[in-house]
Amino acid sequence: MLNWDSPLDVGSVNINHNKPQTSVNEKTEDRAGHSAVNKLEPIRAMDKRVINGDADINQLLPLRYSWAWKYFLNANKNHWTPLDINMTQDIHDYHNKLTEAEKHMYQNVMAYLTTSDILAMRNIGLAVMEKMSAPELQIYQARQVYEEALHTWAYQHCIETLGLEQGEIYNRYRVVPAIYRKIEIANKRLNTILQADIDLRSQKGMHDFVLAYIFFAAVFEGSWFYNGFSPVFSLQRRGLMKGTAEQLQYIMRDEVMHCSFGIRTIKQIIVENKLVVDEDSVAEMWDEALQAETDYAEYLMSEPILGYTKEQHIEQFRYIANRRARQLKMSEPFPGAECALTWLDEQANVRKEKNFFETRVTEYQTGGGLLWE
């Protein structure tokens, strides 16, 4: 078996000066007389880089980033579909138990999420993934693209199941300023990654790419998404909209992995390129995100909701933002922020036991016991 740390010597070419030499691009024949291309040097793991690597992008092994492959394996243990979850009680709750303020909150959380996950899918699939030069990273990101599409289906399934006007809900991000502002910021921040002519061989180009990736992994997925499910989870804690909350709970587990993978990748890019990230630019990013989240929370909770307040929502965003900054080995943007929703982290880890004869088992294969790294 080939030892990837000490690749076999492909041997030197014996030159017969009485015969013309074979060009490196010409085909030779093996002992059986079959046509074959000249041998290439085996790939070494250390030849790989996250971006601008020289190794063959089509060859998975040897792995350099074994952690990326582990993310892919974990993600495949987390398989589910929206149809696995019973939404019957949600129909009754929405039409008979929710107040108008709670319906307003629910509808607009869905309106924001439906657009955001499509944006996330496009960003990973069309912009980030193509710039990776190690297949183990691309393979996980291919799974991530699928998961974003699955999440979009989940939101659509909830909206359709409750009998809401889908066109109206989906168009809210275009007419509600507090929702549109978050999407507008995301489009602006991610525009750098989407540019086909970005020069990733230059320090400036790489720095712009990393800033955009920080926004996507730490702010967009790691904070806005992570915090964005909590209004519906607050209903779940009161025994309401449990089917929707279960959908979001599974989505949250996926998003935790997306965020973790993105931050891990960003740190690897910084090390490989000896990049010094401008922390003032990152601080400005967090301030802009906080203002947008504040406006969004004030719109969602324009009327009081039992057991959940806009102040809690905003403070939790600040707290999660500090966590993401620490994961990136950067300064906390909001020193002193406190955990306002002590129960939120439980949503990514709780196990559920279900009666097999009552409903289909919808627990992730090993969802509650994953290593979230």
Image (cartoon, rainbow, N blue to C red):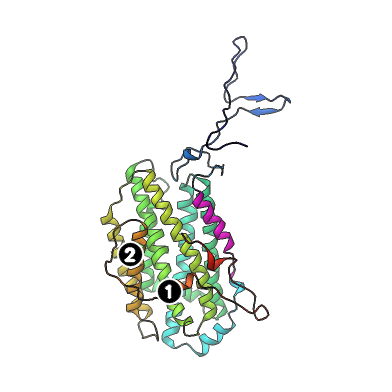
Magenta stretch bounds: 66-81
Residue 282: % across, % down: 30, 57
Q: Please state if 131 lies on the left or on the right of 353 as rendered.
A: left
Q: Are marks 1 and 2 in contact (CB under 8 Å)?
A: no
Residue 295 seen in this snapshot: no
Q: Residue furthest right?
A: 32
Secondary structure beneath label 1: helix
With respect to residue 47, does 166 lie above or below?
below
Looking at numbered disc 1 in the image, what kind of residue is underneath it?
Leu
Residue 322: which numbered mark, if any?
2
Q: CA distance from mark 1 to mark 2?
A: 15 Å
Image point (48%, 76%), residue name: 168
With respect to residue 297, does 262 lie above or below?
above
Quick check: is 253 in the magenta stretch? no
Quick check: is 75 in the magenta stretch? yes
Q: Please state if 32 lies on the left or on the right of 245 as rendered.
A: right
Residue 48: % across, % down: 48, 41
Mark sitting earlier along the chain (1/2): 2
Residue 207 seen in this snapshot: yes
Residue 344: which numbered mark, if any?
1
Secondary structure beneath label 2: helix
* Displayed quadrant of residue 175: bottom left
Give the class, few, some or many, for how many residues have Cα within 10 Å of label 2's Cα (few <14, many ≥20). Answer: many
Which one is nearer the viewer's eye here, 16 or 165? 16
- Dominant SS type (magenta): helix
Residue 258: % across, % down: 47, 60
Looking at numbered disc 2 in the image, what kind of residue is underneath it?
Asn
Q: Residue furthest bottom?
A: 96
